[in-house]
Image (cartoon, rainbow, N blue to C red):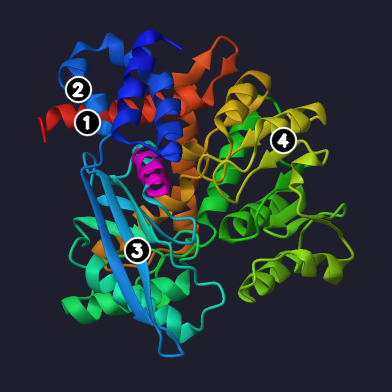
């Protein structure tokens, strides 16, 4: 590592001790964009990178609520408003026991670049709570969401900060959050995305991240002279992202052979398609997060407490959570013939796995691959502003265009001889746009 990069990262880590996920995200970006940063004296003089790695605002608050037994429960809520140079803060809310400030800072930092790549007017932010909806009744979830929004509503708005869903925050939670915002503020505005279709939501939003990831993979394959049809895929998770990706892959003639959960993974040699995809929705609705019932339903093989990256596939798409592919997983995938990995999860690979994959195969990072979700959230904001609902075809068509343009940006900034460094392309492409906007707006 260059001495000056190391000096920058050492100073950052000293200020943000213990925030390992945030450090990992920053290091990946800094190493990619450092030459561009050094070559532009205006960036250095304005200390753009130092400012870009410091959130504009961090909000942390307690969330008291009463469970069904009448016991008072306390959780911690967060909103990290990271960068508004390109537009209102935009990014999801995550309800999960693993939520920490480090996790949300890493996600908000990544979101800034991801939103920049979409070319839509959105800044970067992220929020959530260490609350888990798992095992809670609908009334408990409603009471928690109402308490959470009672505080959060002070800091958000359609022109300020527009949260969306994420892990643990689906249509039910967005509904409860929106209802409380409307109740307190006495206004019906597009303050959240991922809403129900009857009250301001957009078609294709639940599938958007998975669909967009597959569209991005399509463009990666095109550069390699290949197509999705006939390829075998390994997918992790079985939530909205995995469901959307599996649906689109099957539609385009590919074959997905794995899904996973906290209990292990499923290998279905016949491929996941048709009624099996529909069953994933039923399985997810049980709220227990396990995939073993799929094996019982369709006679597939279940591997308890293991990850799907040991199977022989052509293409891998991590769709679950950060750092779910480590170096050993990456090496095993490549050894077994995998020639392309695209992260649909945020920072789905560990740092050493990503470094290995950049050199070994075609590898693309989450900030580019999974940008379809926030892109359609941005399109939902536009529909809300216009008081219009677009057709499924119109939303999907715009998503196609956005993902193609993101891929084009990665190619433009990431070409290294006859190979595309998608990590460099995504980071530099996202950085330059945000940096120039920050310069134009002064020291704020």
Mark 2 or 3, which is nearer the eye?
3
Q: Earlier in the sequence, mark 3 or mark 1?
A: 1
| Mark-to-mark CA distance, 1 and 2 | 6 Å
Q: CA distance from mark 3 to mark 4?
A: 34 Å
Mark-to-mark CA distance, 3 and 1: 26 Å
Viewed as shown, does residue 112 lie left or right of 315?
Answer: left
x 36%, y 44%: residue:
105
Q: Which residue is mark 3?
A: 76
Residue 256 placement, left or right of 218: right
Against 230, residue 11 (above or below) is above
Q: Secondary structure at mark 1?
A: helix
Q: Answer few, some or many: residues within 10 Å of disc 3's Cα (few below 14, many 20 plus, some between 14 and 19).
A: some
Numbered tag placed on residue 329 in the rendering: 4
Q: Which residues are magenta?
A: 102-112
- Taking the magenta stretch, the answer to whether it contains residue 193 is no
Separation of disc 4 and disc 2 at Cα? 38 Å
Which residue matches tag 2? 47
Q: Residues under labels 2 and 3: Cα distance?
A: 33 Å
Label 4 or label 2, whichever comes before in sequence order:
2
Residue 421 placed where, x, y %?
54, 21
Q: Which secondary structure lies at badge 2?
A: loop
The residue where tag 1 is placed is 51
């Amino acid at each position: 590592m260059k001495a000056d990069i190391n000096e920058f990262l050492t100073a950052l880590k000293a200020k943000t001790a213990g925030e390992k996920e945030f450090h990992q995200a920053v290091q990946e970006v800094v190493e990619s964009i450092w030459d561009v940063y050094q070559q532009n004296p205006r960036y250095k003089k304005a200390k753009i990178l130092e400012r870009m790695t410091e959130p504009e605002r961090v909000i942390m608050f307690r969330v008291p609520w009463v469970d069904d037994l009448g016991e008072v429960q306390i959780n911690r809520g967060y909103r990290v408003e990271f960068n508004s140079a390109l537009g209102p803060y935009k990014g999801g809310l995550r309800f999960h026991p693993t939520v920490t400030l480090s996790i949300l800072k890493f996600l908000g930092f990544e979101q800034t670049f991801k939103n920049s790549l979409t070319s839509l007017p959105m800044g970067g932010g992220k929020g959530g709570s260490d609350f888990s909806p798992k095992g809670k009744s609908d009334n408990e979830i409603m009471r928690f969401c109402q308490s959470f929004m009672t505080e959060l509503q002070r800091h958000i708005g359609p022109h300020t900060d527009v949260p969306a869903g994420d892990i643990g925050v689906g249509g039910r939670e967005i509904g409860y959050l929106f209802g409380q915002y409307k109740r307190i503020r006495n206004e019906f505005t597009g303050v959240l995305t991922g809403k129900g279709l009857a009250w301001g939501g957009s078609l294709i939003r639940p599938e958007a991240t998975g669909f967009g990831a597959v569209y991005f993979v399509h463009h990666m394959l095109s550069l390699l002279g290949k197509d999705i049809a006939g390829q075998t895929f390994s997918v992790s998770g079985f939530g909205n992202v995995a469901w959307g990706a599996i649906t689109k892959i099957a539609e385009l003639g590919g074959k997905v052979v794995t899904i996973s959960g906290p209990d292990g993974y499923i290998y279905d040699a016949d491929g996941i398609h048709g009624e099996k995809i529909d069953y994933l929705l039923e399985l997810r609705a049980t709220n227990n997060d396990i995939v073993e019932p799929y094996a019982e339903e369709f006679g597939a093989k279940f591997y308890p407490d293991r990850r799907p990256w040991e199977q022989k596939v052509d293409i891998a798409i991590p769709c679950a959570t950060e750092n779910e592919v480590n170096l050993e997983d990456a090496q095993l995938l490549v050894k077994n013939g995998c020639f392309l990995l695209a992260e649909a999860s945020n920072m789905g690979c560990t740092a050493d796995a990503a470094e290995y994959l950049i050199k070994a195969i075609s590898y693309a990072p989450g900030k580019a691959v999974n940008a379809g979700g926030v892109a359609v959230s941005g399109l939902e904001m536009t529909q809300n502003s216009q008081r219009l609902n677009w057709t499924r075809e119109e939303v999907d068509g715009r998503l196609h265009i956005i993902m193609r343009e993101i891929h084009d940006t990665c190619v433009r900034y990431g070409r290294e001889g006859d190979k595309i460094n998608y990590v460099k392309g995504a980071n530099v492409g996202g950085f330059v746009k945000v940096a120039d906007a920050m310069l134009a707006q002064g020291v704020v």
